[in-house]
Image: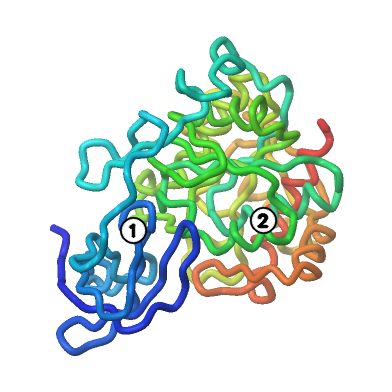
Amino acid sequence: MAAWAEGRISEVLEVTRDLMRAHATVEGEEISAVGFPSMLGPLSVGDRVVLNVTGLELGLGTGGDGFILWNLDGDGAPGPGEGHIIKLRYTPWQTEVAAAEAPESPHHEALSQLETVSGMPVIVCGLHSQVAGAVAGVREAAPDSRIGYLMTDGAALPLAWSRLVASLRSAGLIDVSCTSGHAFGGDLESINVYSGLAALRAAGAADVVVAAMGPGVVGSATRLGFSGMEVGELLDAAGALGGHAVACLRMSFSDPRPRHQGVSHHSLTALRLATARRATIAVPLLPEEPERLVQTSLAEAGLGERHELAFADGRPGLELLRRKQIEVTSMGRTLDETPELWVAAAAAGRVATRWL
């Protein structure tokens, strides 16, 4: 069960429209505290707050903060918004959004009968951090394209939690975002990934979309128990809507865990078991020995027969990330320590531009 604590705000570090970061003192110990203004209202030094400290109690790297549930001394959350679609339904934190497809939305008419994304390329990543490489690969190969990001509810639910998306927006690598399912906080909101892709195309005028969960991938060291299985469902959704589905491979040559060395079993399993439709797998150009390892993994999984393999150079996209000074990490490893992860993502971005 969740762990709760009462504390007092000792320092406010950052306040934006979507996110508040602070320090709170809980039983004499200072902890990192995070809140969302749309749910809490304003926050000030000295305010007594109730926090969810489950991540801290478990010693988690992801979610290792105290999340502010309620400000006991504040004015409370702002009033209801314009929308009536509820996300986080039937939890104490359920919140209303103006979904793009809802009857009260200005986009409702355009989306009411829409069942296609009209050939739009959709790049699907199993890790949030790979979004950076994917959008850089697109931008480098097609500088004038309009790039959308579809965030699923497979991990973090508030888009504001992603510092990466904020930096990619500032750098001009993402033009429009949509949060689908129970994820919230995008430029557009959608009820599911199908309507999210359609909304990005019709309402967001996206030329290409990168679809991936937010920060906080979950794994269990079992064959099926990981959040990246949604990759298969996302690829199928893109294909069903008449888009070009491009899979980004998760790969590493520095991860000590055997199941993630070379092409991760997360990619291999999702592409082998969770896809009903044929998709395109982007394969990055690599030095001879790593390339042999990747090719062997794909062949042993039978993916060359089930899907189309498309080879591309991801290095130009990687260099664009460096020039834009985008800081990315995965499992604590940086761009310099695990470049192949983002080379693979940038290769997927480059492959997707073949249909622009």
Extreme residue toward the top, this view: 113
Instruction: Tell me: 217 left or right of 310.
Output: left
Label whose residue precedes the other's in the sequence (2 or 1):
1
Of the numbered discs in the image, which one, if any, rests on residue 327? none
Residue identified by numbered label 1:
41
What residue lies at 15% left-to-right and 66% top-to-bottom?
Answer: 4
Extreme residue toward the front, this view: 75
Instruction: Tell me the quadrant of the picture where the C terminus can be found.
Output: top right
Closer to the camera in the image, 80 or 291: 80
Residue identified by numbered label 2:
169
Question: In the image, residue 200 lies at what x, y percent?
Answer: 63, 32
CA gap, disc 2 and disc 1: 25 Å
Please say if the residues under marks 2 and 1 sit with CB atoms less than 8 Å apart. Answer: no
What residue lies at 15% left-to-right and 85% top-to-bottom?
Answer: 27
Instruction: Tell me: 271 left or right of 168.
Output: left
Amino acid at dot 2: Arg
What residue lies at 23% left-to-right and 69% top-to-bottom?
Answer: 53
The quarter of the picture where residue 56 lies is bottom left
The correct choice, above or below, for 305 with respect to 297 in the image is above
What is the crowding at mark 1: few (fewer than 14 residues within 10 Å), some, or many (at least 20)?
some
Marks counted in the figure total 2
Amino acid at dot 1: Gly
Question: In the image, residue 294 lies at what x, y percent?
Answer: 67, 53
Instruction: Tell me the quadrant of the picture where the N terminus can be found.
Output: bottom left
Extreme residue toward the bottom, this view: 28
Camera sees residue 92: yes
The correct choice, above or below, for 242 with respect to 207 in the image is above
